[in-house]
Amino acid sequence: MRRHAVLLACAVAFAAVWSPLARSADWQVRVSPDDALYPVLDLSQRPSTKPDDNRYGDGSGMVAVDVVAARNDERVSLSVGAPGLAEPASVQAVLPRAGERYTLRPRLRWSRRALASMVKPQNVVAEFALQRDDAPAQRQRREIRLHPLSEALYYVRDGKDHVDLGWIFAAYADPDSQVIDDIFDQVAERHPFLPLKPGPRTPAQALASAYAIWEVLQLHGVRYADEDPGLARGPLVWSQHVRLHDDVWSERRANCIDGSLLLAAALERLGIRSVLLLVPRHALLAFYTDDKKSSPVFVETTLLGARQLAVRPKPGFVGELSLIDSDALDSFSAALVAGKARYAREAAGFGQRKPDYQWIDLATARSYGIIPLAAAEAAPARAATPR
């Protein structure tokens, strides 16, 4: 397994061959993949700090300009404007050697307000301006396909080449979301003796914590939305719609991946390691109840809000709780049984490098550099400086 930055670098290199170049004299514009922009690819990772003698700027590389230096120590300044950006993206550099090609990768600062109004992809025009030394700026216009923030591009293929970007889903799990604050406030009120901070837990306490989160969601009125979140299923790209936590909470509806990611975010806040599992046309959640991470518990989130289920024996973790909603306890118990059964049916598909089978461990994704979308928005802007 490789770090997400490496995966994105592969995607950029792959898409550079796949996408046509817009040429103007001795500089070329690249928008990858295939003249499309997915804001989540930018917002899910911190700016790159890896030095590169031929690359300037801390952008992801999904938008890049290749420039051939006209002379030694040529000063260049690139500006990129496009709908959806909070401000034009820019990068400045001093290109050391005449005749050599350099890549400018501006960091795109997206406007969450503008992106929030997008519900489907739009064709927009991006404008590129490159100034060399003190000469007038050269300009290019490029039509691109801008996708909503809620659309996660998780697999790209062209012939035998492919790039797996499944780790991108971890960006939609935000443990610091206000929604998680609201959930934990209600958990604390209903179960005052349940620990709500990271730290050692018994398996019973871990299960009780997961139930308490589930219970609050069900009491709030969140119900499973029977809908297909898949947007593109090949042959070139695979992408999926994901509701943000605020939308789940306000709309009181969640499909399988929305509910799984919201639960995963709350468990991450508690220090409980969780995994998002993608299987064909479906997603479910797994989490570990012990420090050894040896036996995951699987949760079928389509049962969130279900009622009038078969009566089951009370699980052992109820001793850790104070108030118990019988409907929520029934649906959570059923979700554990159904999740285990679903994983048993699908287990053989994992490890086969198929886009429809993904095992996305949130802790591993964080170690790869994947950050919650809100964390990217809160990070201070860092302008690239000439070198």
Image: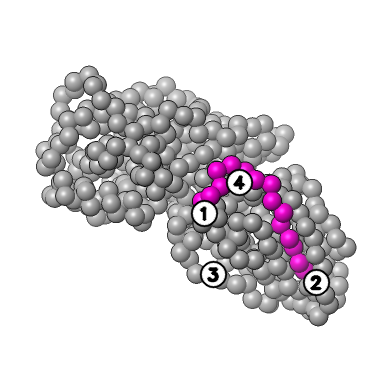
Residue denoted by label 1: 44
* Residue 153 as seen in the image, left or right of residue 71: left
Q: Residue most toward the right? A: 25
Q: Amino acid at mark 4?
A: His
* Mark with earlier residue (2, 3): 2
Residue 270 screen position, x and y as percent: 28, 51
Give the Cα separation between the discs numbered 2 and 3.
24 Å
Q: CA distance from mark 3 to mark 1?
A: 15 Å
Residue 376 lies, in percent from the top left, at: 49, 60
Crowding at dot 4, Cα within 10 Å, few <14 / some 14-19 / many 20+, comes out as: many
Relative to 353, 340 lies left or right: left
Name of the residue lying farthest toward the front: 117
Query: Residue placed at 23% from the left, 21% from the top?
Result: 308
Q: CA distance from mark 3 to mark 4?
A: 23 Å
Q: Nearer the viewer, mark 2 or mark 3?
A: 2
The residue sitting at 73% across, 73% down in the picture is 77
Which residue lies under the disc numbered 2?
A: 137
**Does residue 265 lie above or below 358 as drawn?**
below
Label 1, label 4: how far apart the Cα atoms are: 15 Å
**Circle 4 sits on which residue?**
147
Q: Residue at x 15, y 36 (%)?
A: 324
